[in-house]
Amino acid sequence: MDNPVVFMTPMFVEFGKLLFLVSIAPLIIYSMKFYALGFASIFFRKGREDMFKPLTGRNLPRVSVHIPVYNDPVVVDCVKKCLEFDYPKGKYEIIVADDSSDETSGLLDKLHKEGGGFRIIRRKSRAGFKAGALNGCLKASKGGIVVVFDSDYSPEKDFLRRVVKPFADKEVAFVQTRWDYKNPSTNRISKLAMISYNAFHQCSMPVKDRIGTAIFCGTGGAIRKDVLQSIGGWNEKSIGEDIDLTVRMLCKGYKQVYLPGVRVKGEVPETLKSFVKQQQRWAYATTKALKDYFGSILFSKELSKMQKFDLMLIMTGFLTFPFIMGVTLSTLLTMLPWFGPGVVGEFFSFNGFVDSMSKALGSFFSLEGVILLGLSCGYMFECAVALIMQRKYRDIATIPYIFVVGLVLEVTNTIAVFKALLGKKYSFYKTPKTSYRGVIVK
């Protein structure tokens, strides 16, 4: 009796070819975006910090530093760093929103008892997670400028003086600084995470700053308190409160500033699970924001055509993952004839497998295959440009590892995207740091 898999192989192959064509087209379009950002970033190496004069004396605005924390003992180091700011003591306050249920609360109480200098607010529940904690800080704030730090971030002494400079322009609603990293060399995952975030901050953000679509990244940034209040505060229904807030502010016509010269260090994920979960949360949050604010972006009278175009590219970015998955599946289907009866038949033939693999690799490295690979590798190009601009040449060898981790991300991010589009609930996952274990919150 004929093997049914062999019998159906031609049909699988034709379907695979069609699926490949449908899937590769949008990937090439987005790949061109990354090529463009990589090239453009060469001309936008410097930020706009020099355009703003330093503020002194009475011109210095009052600042409220908000630090949301949940079971993160590392927050003690963050608070200590904030207490060392060279900003006038009467001009800034530190508010820690402590939702912890472990030793973190005791450590904060001990630090407060030893020297004070900051306030601790505690809620009865973790409603709204990070967004809820930040709204609690907002209600307790006295400053006109709100600065947000995740608990693992360590700012420099001059951070406040530099981040408030752009607010001399009354139309500037928020300022984002550049992320730097404490643990990029721990292992291959942490290095890959660093490369990914580095490409965004080195190449994408400076260009978006000029367009007017830089993103408030959730930490290491500052926002006008009155603007934050006028748009309803942080969205407690979103697990991506930063991208949600960004879209709402930009659609109202507010300006943004990105300061690549001002860096603040934080941790990157060190395990495959934590990296994948973080990416999955961002995929869900960004896609949900697209669903919620598609009309607001499209019909905003405050946004320019270029801003609308770039925001749409940002918001639809994670929609590429179903297509990446389509390319992978289509490739497997079109490879069926190469493996013949030795693999899809009734028995396994080692010699047949080796012969089939040589044919498959030969086809992959054909002129057509190389061209398609080149057209779809824009993201790798952006990553490489970012590393070269920083003279981190050795880290370029880690870039191909994106393909390996991508096999996992194409599945997990696709699930997250469809959950967001279908309105399914997504469980909040707290990215683990080196000083504690991650917890999934239902």
Image (cartoon, rainbow, N blue to C red):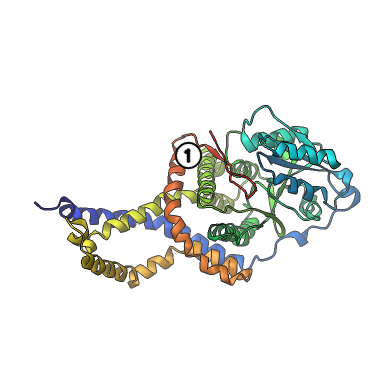
User: What residue appears at the point 50 percent right and 42 percent down from the top-left corner?
Assistant: 284
Res 244 quadrant in image: top right
Q: Which residue is mark 1?
A: 420
Horizontal side of residue 254 vs 282, given as left or right:
right
User: What residue appears at the point 38 percent right and 70 percent down from the top-left corner?
Assistant: 370
- Frontmost residue, 126 versus 75: 75
Picture coordinates of residue 376, whole percent (x, y) = 43, 62
Picture coordinates of residue 7, whole percent (x, y) = 15, 53
- Frontmost residue, 318 versus 356: 356
Q: Is residue 228 above or below residue 357?
A: above
Res 114 quadrant in image: top right
Horizontal side of residue 180 vs 368, given as left or right:
right
Picture coordinates of residue 138, whole percent (x, y) = 73, 35
- Frontmost residue, 300 versus 5: 5
Q: Is residue 438 above or below residue 406?
A: above
User: What residue appears at the point 66 percent right and 57 percent down from the top-left corner?
Assistant: 182
Horizontal side of residue 282 vs 151, given as left or right:
left
SS for callout 1: helix
Q: Residue furthest right?
A: 57
Amino acid type, residue under disc 1 in the picture: Ala
